[in-house]
Image: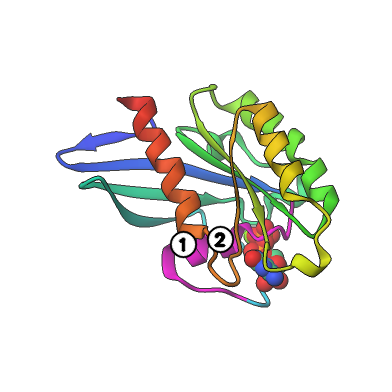
């Protein structure tokens, strides 16, 4: 139900999950508006943003959902996950605990979505190399273990943000065709 084909247009629902302050909202604003917010507080009320992406001549409307602060209370509802065909599981490379919590987020995802959801492990804030607490290797091996794609991003300097979404969208196409 997550994807609809209306003529040449596809609609893919993608959820962004992970601990508080890993940069989920900024990844989303970088992707959809090319904006970064240095003082972002928990977003209240914004459910999702849409961004058109062209993949191999096909128009895709990526509807990307943001937890809007619910992650603090571990209270992300099933409505949030409903119909999702892609997921970005985000941690902060400068905070080890956010990486250790990835497994819990994957468990959450697995209870709400079936295994065909395209999953990407995202190590955000790769601009913070000097205070890195999670190596690239650790990210890669967790991704391999769990069968996820892996990428490091920076919402601050734009590194790989578009690419992360693009890879997920391509995988969604693979899953439906
Ligand atoms: P969320 O709680 O996961 O939605 O995280 P936010 O997007 O609100 O970001 C939390 C904090 O991290 C904010 O102060 C952001 O400015 C900062 N931040 C987000 N992405 C990056 C990044 O790629 N690099 C750096 N250095 N800071 C970031
Ligand atoms: Mg947020």
Q: Residue furthest bottom?
A: 38
Q: Which residue is mark 1?
A: 31
Instruction: State whether label 1 is within 8 Å of ligand 1.
Output: no
Give how far across and how far down residue 164 sits, in percent: 50, 50
Horizontal relation, residue 110 to residue 137: left or right? left
Q: Which residue is mark 2?
A: 27
Instruction: State whether label 2 is within 8 Å of ligand 1.
Output: yes
Give how far across and how far down residue 53 sits, in percent: 32, 53
Which element type, helix, strand or loop, lies under badge 2? helix
Give how far across and how far down residue 117 sits, in percent: 50, 30
Horizontal relation, residue 7 to residue 76: left or right? left
Asked if residue 153 can be seen in this view, the reply is yes
Q: Quadrant of ligand 2?
A: bottom right
Asked if residue 64 can be seen in this view, the reply is no
Horizontal relation, residue 107 to residue 66: left or right? right
Give how far across and how far down residue 130 sits, in percent: 80, 69
Decide which of 146, 112 is in the foreground and name it: 146
- Rendered image coloring scheme: rainbow
84 inside magenta stretch: no
Which element type, helix, strand or loop, lies under badge 1? helix
Residue 102 appears in which quarter of the rendering? top right
Decide which of 44, 147 is in the foreground and name it: 147
Q: Quadrant of the N terminus?
A: top left
* Contact check, label 2 and label 1, Cβ < 8 Å: yes
At 37% from the left and 41% from the top, the residue drawn is: 12
32 inside magenta stretch: yes
Q: Residue furthest left?
A: 7
Above or below, 118 against 153 in this view is: above
At 31% from the left and 56% from the top, the residue drawn is: 52
Give the magenta-colored segment's residue range: 19-37
Residue 119 appears in which quarter of the rendering? top right
Decide which of 94, 13 is in the foreground and name it: 94
């Amino acid at each position: 139900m997550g994807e609809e084909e209306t003529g040449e247009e596809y609609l893919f629902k993608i959820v962004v999950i992970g601990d508080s302050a890993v940069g989920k909202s900024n990844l989303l604003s970088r992707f959809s508006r090319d904006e970064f917010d240095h003082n972002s507080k928990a977003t209240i009320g914004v459910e999702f943003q849409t961004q058109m992406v062209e993949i191999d001549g096909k128009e895709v409307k990526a509807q990307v959902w943001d937890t809007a602060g619910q992650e603090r209370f571990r209270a992300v509802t099933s409505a949030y996950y409903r119909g999702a065909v892609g997921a970005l599981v985000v941690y902060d490379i400068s905070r080890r605990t956010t990486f250790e919590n990835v497994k819990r987020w994957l468990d959450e995802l697995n209870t709400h979505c079936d295994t065909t959801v395209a999953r990407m492990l995202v190590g955000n804030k790769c601009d913070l190399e000097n205070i890195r607490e999670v190596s690239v290797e650790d990210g890669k091996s967790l991704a391999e273990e769990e069968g996820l794609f892996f990428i490091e991003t920076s919402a601050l300097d734009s590194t790989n943000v578009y690419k992360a979404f693009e890879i997920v969208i391509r995988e969604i196409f693979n899953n439906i065709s």
